[in-house]
Image (cartoon, coloured by chain):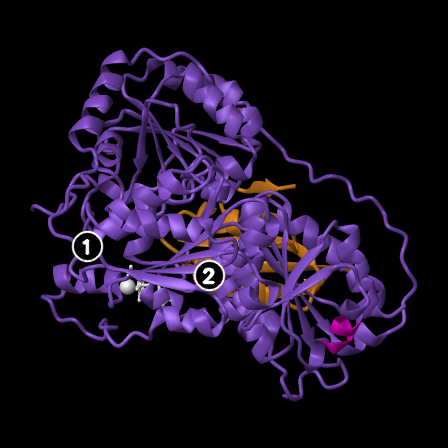
Chain colours: A purple, B orange
Amino acid sequence: MKGAELVLKVLQQQGVDTIFGYPGGAIMPIYDAIYHSTVKHYLCRHEQGGAFSAIGYARASGKVGVCLATSGPGATNLITSLADALLDSVPLVAITGQVSQAVMGTDAFQEVDVLGLSLGVTKHSFMVRDVNELAHTLQEAFRLAQSGRPGPVLVDIPKDIQLAEVSEPEWPTLPAARLATSLANAAKARQLIAQAKKPIAYIGGGVQMADALPQLQAFLAESEMPSVTTLKGMGSVARANPHYLGMLGMHGTQAANLAVQQCDLLICLGARFDDRVTGKLDKFAPHAKVIHVDIDPAEINKVRFADCALLGDMKQILPAISTATQCADWLTHCQQLKQQYGWRYDHPGERIFAPLMLKQLSERMPDNSVVCCDVGQHQMWVAQHMRFNSPRNHLSSGGLGTMGFGLPAAIGAKLARPQDTVIAVSGDGSFMMNVQELGTIKRFRLPVKIVIIDNQRLGMVKQWQQLFFNERYSETDLSDNPDFVALAAAFAIPGHTITRKDEVASALEAMFSWPGPYLLHVRIDEKDNVWPLVPPGAANEDMLTETN
Amino acid sequence: MQHTLNITTRNEASVVERLLQVTRYRGYQLAGLAMTPLTDRAGLQITLTVQSEKPITLLTSQLVKLYDVQQLELASADVAVLRA
Ligand SMILES: Cc1ncc(C[n+]2csc(CCOP(=O)(O)OP(=O)(O)O)c2C)c(N)n1
Ligand SMILES: [Mg+2]
């Protein structure tokens, strides 16, 4: 068989049945093999979109996402998505065609140094130089993408390798990735927890990625303590848990931020002290000792010193550090914070208030719906006002904060979980960044629900201009937006525009009862901002609210 | 502070670039670099000298994550094998 056919064989052997991509000269042999393959290929309309769909697929399902692109411009179009997957630790395998080895290094047509470009945006990248190494290299790419801290792996395959004859290799069963877990510090951690008067659990995306949500609930139940989550950790704590305080950080809840600032023990579980979480680092949780549990040794002491670190499998570590606490006063105090600073949804006037609208959406959407976000104010409102029962149901571009993520991620999520409702919540700015993927939705008749929160602004940037740049609104006006409903109609997607609060309930009803894709265009006041907000350089207790 | 790292890697064309990319990105200044293939040509022996006020473990913990890095030891005052 040819190398190209072997690529498809390896994908099948890895259990891959869904791939996303876009063809071109240097990857044509692989597309020729796809023609006869049972692996289902979804044609995106831009390689960035295809790779975001693969990321959405991976994040919604826990499987590896796979995307394909041709050499040169196809491969460069992948770069943003690879960076997104790297910063959010998403298992992704990207396969790129490369020009033939005979012309490599001559600035051949559509030749670009993809391996060189990949260095800063992948966990690892391979260039296949010998067709006899092709199968093993691809297997290794899949193993690497999923092992330890997951991430994107790129395999660049020159065209002559795709065309070369190769015999089907023996399929060695690779040993399952061995995960070294050290429980040496478990006793110390238990002691710190037992002695703490004000402990708090700070939960990141790593807990769910380790498949340790049941162990987390058990830990929080036994060591009864308050908890907060990062953007990626949202949905980790069971809804029934009374001590959950919400998201922390720049747009976190006041209760979460104040409790973390006051705590004497911070138990960081699969999180990495990102600057959007900590605010001013040397004022973050200033009284706290830190227990840091992670799979990546490089995260320990990277930005915050850990008094006690445990490395390895969260599933084993959580039961090992679980112990009873004596902190009834602290729990009461945190409850008071939660009550004192609860969300308020009263909002004068007839116009739609996005936080309330998203709360209504959250209450109305079917259980286990997947919400895919874009980036900006609407993204933060989703995180604040919608509730999720798993991080797999809230796909938001966290580390890279990539506008244009939401729509293609929703496509991938819908293909991963066809039985579940998938909703893309986008902004008028972000939506236009991968709007071409409406073509993918149209072709495959994917019943994705699209909600555009339209403030006719690059709202998040506008908010910063208002607060920190003396109201100089440089290049953030989008009041000449296209007619979004007409745009959807061009892709045979029905839609509807709403502007008033009293239209929300029936509009949501109409969207959910329609069997196919649907676009709901929600006009809001451009003056609405996201609160609270920790200004850049400030400590997390110094949150700005609408009233100050 | 100057630190010298003795690194054994796979013999892959991109290895040196990868080491240098991580070193630069993590904010360590390159002060010296030497590379020789191992006698069987299966691997490379690389000596990397860097300069920084930051703790060297913040660099070594990132370098040992590189797929091609097989062994890394710190050859300064406190010789510590970080990965066997
Ligand atoms: C690709 C990319 N370019 C620029 C930015 C910077 N940025 C962050 S939020 C934002 C505004 C987003 O506007 P919109 O999608 O309308 O969301 P809104 O804040 O108005 O809800 C911009 C430009 C980004 N995050 N990603
Ligand atoms: Mg907007």
Q: The numbered mark 2 sits on a residue in which chain?
A: A
Disc 2 packing (10 Å; few <14; some 14–19; many ≥20)? many
- Residue flagged by tag 2: what amino acid is it? Leu
Over which residues does the magenta segment extend? A28-32
Is A34 above or below relative to A387?
below
What residue is rendered at 86% in x and 70% in y? Answer: A2
Is A150 above or below relative to A38?
above
Q: Is residue A250 visible?
A: no
Q: Determine whether, in the image, residue A455 is placed left or right of residue A115.
A: left
- In the rendered image, residue A546 lying in the magenta stretch gets the answer no
Q: The numbered mark 1 sits on a residue in which chain?
A: A
Disc 1 packing (10 Å; few <14; some 14–19; many ≥20)? many
Determine which residue is flagged by label 1: A529
**For marks 2 and 1 on the same chain, the one whose residue lies earlier in the sequence:** 2
x, y percent for residue A72: 60, 80
Q: Is residue A439 visible?
A: yes
- In the rendered image, residue A30 lying in the magenta stretch gets the answer yes
Marks 2, 1 in one chain: yes
Is A489 above or below relative to A189?
below
Q: Is mark 1 within 8 Å of ligand 1?
A: no
Q: Residue A400, labelled with which disc? A: none
What residue is rendered at 48% in x and 58% in y? Answer: A84
Determine whether the residue tagged by mark 1 lies in a helix, strand or loop: loop
Q: Determine whether, in the image, residue B8 is placed left or right of residue A359.
A: right
- Residue flagged by tag 1: what amino acid is it? Asn
What residue is rendered at 25% in x and 38% in y? Answer: A253
Q: Quadrant of the N terminus of chain A?
A: bottom right
Q: Residue A407, labelled with which disc? A: 2
